[in-house]
């Protein structure tokens, strides 16, 4: 594999507006239930002070995708650029992948009885455009990046956030800039 | 594929410019306009959801009639039948009572488009009527800034990126002005420091370098405390004498009346913090304060804003590029007002104060019966001479909460006709006799300004009206036409017209001048930024009577207010209602009922400190009730960190209409001081 595309999400900048979630739905006209991308609030208990922080996650296009490994009909493929593609035409809706993915990102579409997930807007990427969710993010919290050592060596780049499954399972292609906590002056 | 220019009409700081795409007359997508320097090609999720809303299966597409109220048996009727019913009722009431006062309009400008004022125009054209009047949520602050600066004006929002220090005071742009966030992040990337002052730890506060929790309603005193430190540290602008008025008096007041001990005790901010922050504010240039609407929803709100303005002036930050004290602006709202005033159709000198109650025509002031929108049901029911017999509810949903339902039931039972014009059925339409389907901003012409940035633009229809829906303007013409057919001369509002022409007429000479365009049609090419300087008051010439910034305002004393900004304590809680109820905006919706799909989660979530929850023996998910002498509301409990123990918060999330649902609870609040509502709490 020549490279690995992925996401960089900055919790300092993300305001939890869910614009990315809705932009994805608009792009693919998906119904309410399958949520390819979803915005989560970070658990306040994991930090010493209240955080009001969010992160946004879709398929992580993992280096070692469990979905791909368990799928009995080879509905999953991994492209040269690292994008993990799911082909609904092959999918038989057995849900093995939804159970195998530690991030719960392949989702069953109840109407079609098949699985769906983010394919990293590969058709847009192939035309030199950015993914729909990245384009929509107003504060610029979500970016498309190449996951490599030079990125990981930068200060402040995290491989996981509190509450997420261990990245050792699948080596997800997502990096985070975590919450930096400012000083809070309160008297309570 | 065709592209059209639209503008998001929601009551929101951002007023985004939208490019909509249609294919064979069907709206297929909406995107932010990349050529608009504030929208920058991006929309918030509310607007991104528009396509779904336009074609929602729940949307009402035809005029409907309900023979028996609350029966839910709606039958489709023709527009002609609907208009005849309305016009006949109006004429019949006029004949019976010898006046049109039994006719009432209850409209809230959830849609800020100028052409939506057609409804007011129609009612004015009919004669003296009964109107629900709601003070806009920002009036105290507007007044304060007008006293200090002479007019209501702010720097261009992009100017903030040049600040070295940003104080976000009672604003939560992460949720209410998302497009300002990249500008603030930009400033941070260039080394700016951000301090956030608020009553609760907001999503914006979480992203600031420092969060300072201020006891509700004491922000004015905090500003005066900062001013005291500036004096002590000699951080006063030495040139004050050349462009301000009354600074000696103000300094004298601070020296003699303000003590830091008292300030710290009341505001809850430690003295050392007050000192450090003030020194930083006095030493850093440019430093910008952005004051939010929430600050002035207290009985002392105007004084608070004046104190913050005075702090900015004292430190010499006014007129500074990237500095100043920013609140909002009305300068780009100088529309002709022709649509609202059928008696003076080309009234180009009309008040710029478009969104304000003061903008009533003389005619209305003399004759209309004005009721408080907060207590509408009660006041309308108590009207006897003559009683209210017909009610038109437009763009709002006053009947959504059980708390005031009893009052509404009483009023409804005395009404002959209830008309609701909206996109979706709501609690209010359950009680209605007629439902008139209205268009969205993708289906009609309109004209929009922002109260934060300086762009003005035309909204053009992208698709034909869905079903038989009609614009407010069209409906107003149609009603007038029917009235005049049945009784010539019975309504002075035009009986027909052209939407585009009507909007162009709103652009009188003052607006053309502000926008720097030759003719109104030029605005059809795309939104235009008004030709105001990027930095407010850059040459420090002000619009006050003295042409100076007025620490001391004789116009304030003329209005029986203190001429100097002073601290007046906010209201206090009592034993009967020990908790202060705050109702800040949430990001998932803005209070425009028109755009609610009616599927919102009906539970109100009460946020409170874990400790307070414990005190009331409440756990997450418990049902509880908040109440005061005016009403009660059922809520679900959600403890969160970062709020004090004397405050509870219901985010205006699914609250439909800003005041109505809270209406019962906030009746006790003086005026529209929403944040001065106190409640009690009990487990259910
Ligand atoms: S659009 Fe951006 S800011 Fe909004 S939730 Fe998604 S990542 Fe966060
Ligand atoms: S990359 Fe495309 S498919 Fe994946 S979450 Fe973003 S918008 Fe959806
Ligand atoms: S609601 Fe505000 S931010 Fe969202 S699209 Fe409309 S104007 Fe822009």
Image (cartoon, coloured by chain):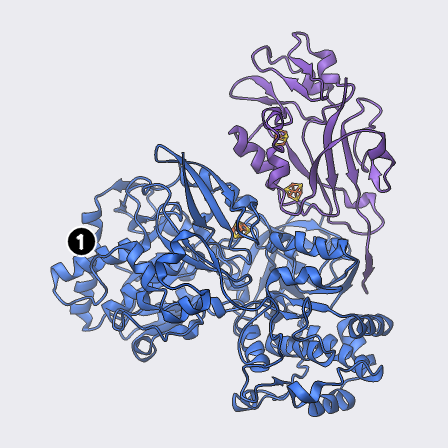
Chain colours: A purple, B blue
Q: Is residue B670 visible?
A: no
Q: Secondary structure at mark 1?
A: helix
Left or right: B565 in relation to B99:
right
Q: Position of residue B381 (x, y in %)?
A: 35, 67
Q: Is residue A63 above or below residue A150?
A: above
* Neighbour tally class for label 1: few under 14, some 14-19, many 20 plus, Cα within 10 Å: some
When asked about the image quadrant of residue B544, the answer is: bottom right
Which residue is at the front of the view, B572 or B241? B241
Q: Which residue is mark 1?
A: B84
Left or right: B490 in relation to B182:
left
Left or right: B12 in relation to B407:
right
Q: Is residue A49 above or below residue B263?
A: above
Q: Is residue B592 visible?
A: yes
Left or right: B138 in relation to B318:
left
Q: Is residue B347 above or below residue B443?
A: below
Q: Chain of mark 1?
A: B
Seen at 67% across and 88% down, the residue is B242
Q: Quadrant of the N terminus of chain B?
A: top left
Outermost residue to the front: B518
The verdict on label 1 being within 8 Å of ligand 3 is no
Q: Position of residue B386 (x, y in %)?
A: 26, 73
Q: Position of residue B174 (x, y in %)?
A: 65, 53
Which residue is at the front of the view, B302 or B5? B5
Which residue is at the front of the view, B543 or A88? B543
Outermost residue to the top: A73
Which residue is at the front of the view, B326 or B615? B326
Q: Position of residue A175 (x, y in %)?
A: 78, 34
Seen at 73% across and 59% down, the residue is B643
Q: How many numbered callouts?
A: 1
When asked about the image quadrant of residue B120, the answer is: bottom left
């Amino acid at each position: 594999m020549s490279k690995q595309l992925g996401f960089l999400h900055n919790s300092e900048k993300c305001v939890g507006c869910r614009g990315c979630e809705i932009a994805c739905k608009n792009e693919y006209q998906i119904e309410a239930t399958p949520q390819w991308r979803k915005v989560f609030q970070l658990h306040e208990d994991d930090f010493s002070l209240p955080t009001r922080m969010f992160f946004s996650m879709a398929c992580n296009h993992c280096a070692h995708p469990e979905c791909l490994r368990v799928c009995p009909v080879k509905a999953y493929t991994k492209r040269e650029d690292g994008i993990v593609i799911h082909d609904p035409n092959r999918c038989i809706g057995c849900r093995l992948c939804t159970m195998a993915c530690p991030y719960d990102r392949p989702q069953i579409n109840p109407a079609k009885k098949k699985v769906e997930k983010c394919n990293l807007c590969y058709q847009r990427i192939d035309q030199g455009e950015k993914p729909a969710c990245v384009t929509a993010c107003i504060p610029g919290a979500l970016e498309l990046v190449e996951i490599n050592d030079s990125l990981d060596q930068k200060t402040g780049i995290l491989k996981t956030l509190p509450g997420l499954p261990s990245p050792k399972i699948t080596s997800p292609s997502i990096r985070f800039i975590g919450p930096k906590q400012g000083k809070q002056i309160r008297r309570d | 594929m065709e592209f059209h220019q639209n503008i998001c009409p929601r009551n929101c700081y951002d007023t985004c410019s939208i490019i909509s795409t249609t294919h064979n007359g069907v709206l297929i997508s909406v995107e932010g306009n990349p050529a608009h320097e504030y929208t920058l090609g991006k929309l918030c999720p509310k607007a991104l959801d528009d396509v779904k809303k336009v074609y929602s299966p729940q949307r009402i597409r035809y005029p409907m009639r309900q023979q028996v109220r609350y029966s839910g048996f709606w039958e489709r009727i023709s527009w002609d039948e609907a208009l005849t019913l309305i016009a006949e009722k109006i004429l019949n009431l006029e004949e019976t009572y010898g006046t049109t006062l039994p006719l009432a309009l209850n409209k809230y400008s959830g849609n800020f488009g100028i052409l939506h004022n057609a409804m007011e125009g129609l009612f004015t054209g009919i004669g003296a009527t009964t109107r629900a009047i709601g003070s806009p949520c920002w009036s105290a602050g507007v007044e304060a800034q007008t006293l200090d600066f002479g007019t209501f004006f702010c720097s261009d929002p992009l100017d903030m990126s040049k600040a070295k220090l940003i104080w976000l005071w009672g604003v939560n742009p992460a949720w209410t002005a998302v497009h300002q966030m990249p500008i603030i992040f930009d400033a941070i990337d260039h080394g700016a420091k951000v301090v956030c002052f608020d009553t609760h730890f907001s999503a914006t506060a979480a992203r600031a370098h420092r969060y300072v929790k201020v006891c509700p309603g004491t922000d004015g005193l905090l500003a005066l405390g900062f001013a005291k430190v500036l004096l002590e540290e000699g951080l006063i602008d030495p040139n004050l004498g050349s462009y301000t008025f009354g600074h000696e008096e103000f300094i004298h007041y601070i020296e003699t009346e303000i003590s830091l001990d008292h300030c710290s005790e009341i505001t809850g901010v430690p003295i050392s913090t007050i000192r450090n922050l003030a020194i930083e504010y006095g030493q850093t240039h440019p430093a910008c304060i952005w004051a939010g609407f929430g600050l002035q929803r207290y009985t002392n709100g105007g004084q608070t804003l004046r104190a913050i303005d005075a702090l900015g002036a004292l430190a010499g930050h006014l007129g500074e590029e990237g500095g100043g004290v920013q609140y909002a602006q009305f300068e780009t709202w100088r529309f002709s007002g022709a649509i609202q005033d059928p008696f003076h159709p080309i009234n180009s000198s009309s008040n710029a104060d478009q969104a304000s109650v003061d903008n009533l025509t003389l005619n209305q002031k003399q004759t209309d019966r004005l009721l408080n929108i907060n207590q509408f049901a009660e006041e309308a029911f108590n009207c006897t001479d003559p009683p209210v017999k017909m009610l038109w509810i437009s763009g709002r949903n006053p009947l959504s909460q059980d708390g005031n339902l009893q009052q509404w039931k009483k009023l409804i039972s005395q009404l002959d006709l209830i008309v609701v014009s909206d996109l979706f059925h709501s609690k209010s339409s359950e009680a209605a006799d007629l439902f008139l389907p209205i268009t969205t901003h993708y289906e009609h012409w309109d004209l929009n300004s922002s109260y934060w940035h300086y762009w003005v633009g035309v909204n053009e229809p992208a698709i034909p009206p869905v079903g038989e829906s009609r614009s407010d303007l069209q409906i107003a013409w149609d009603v007038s036409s029917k009235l005049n057919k049945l009784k010539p001369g019975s309504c002075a509002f035009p009986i027909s017209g052209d939407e585009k022409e009507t909007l162009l007429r709103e652009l009188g000479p003052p607006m053309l001048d502000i926008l720097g365009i030759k003719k109104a049609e030029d605005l059809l090419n795309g939104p235009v930024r008004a030709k105001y300087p990027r930095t407010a008051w850059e040459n420090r010439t002000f619009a006050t009577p003295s042409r100076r910034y007025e620490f001391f305002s004789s116009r304030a004393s003329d209005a029986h207010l203190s001429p100097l900004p002073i601290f007046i304590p906010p209201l206090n809680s009592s034993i009967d209602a020990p908790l202060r109820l705050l109702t800040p905006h949430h990001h998932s919706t803005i209070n425009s009922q028109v755009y609610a799909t009616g599927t919102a989660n009906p539970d109100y979530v009460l946020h409170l400190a874990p400790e307070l929850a414990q005190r009331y023996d409440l756990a997450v998910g418990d049902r509880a009730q908040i109440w005061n002498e005016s009403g009660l509301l059922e809520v679900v409990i959600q403890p969160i960190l970062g709020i004090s123990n004397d405050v509870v918060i219901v985010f205006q999330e699914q609250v439909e209409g800003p005041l109505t649902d809270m209406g019962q609870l906030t009746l006790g609040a003086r005026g529209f001081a929403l944040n001065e509502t106190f409640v009690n709490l009990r487990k259910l």
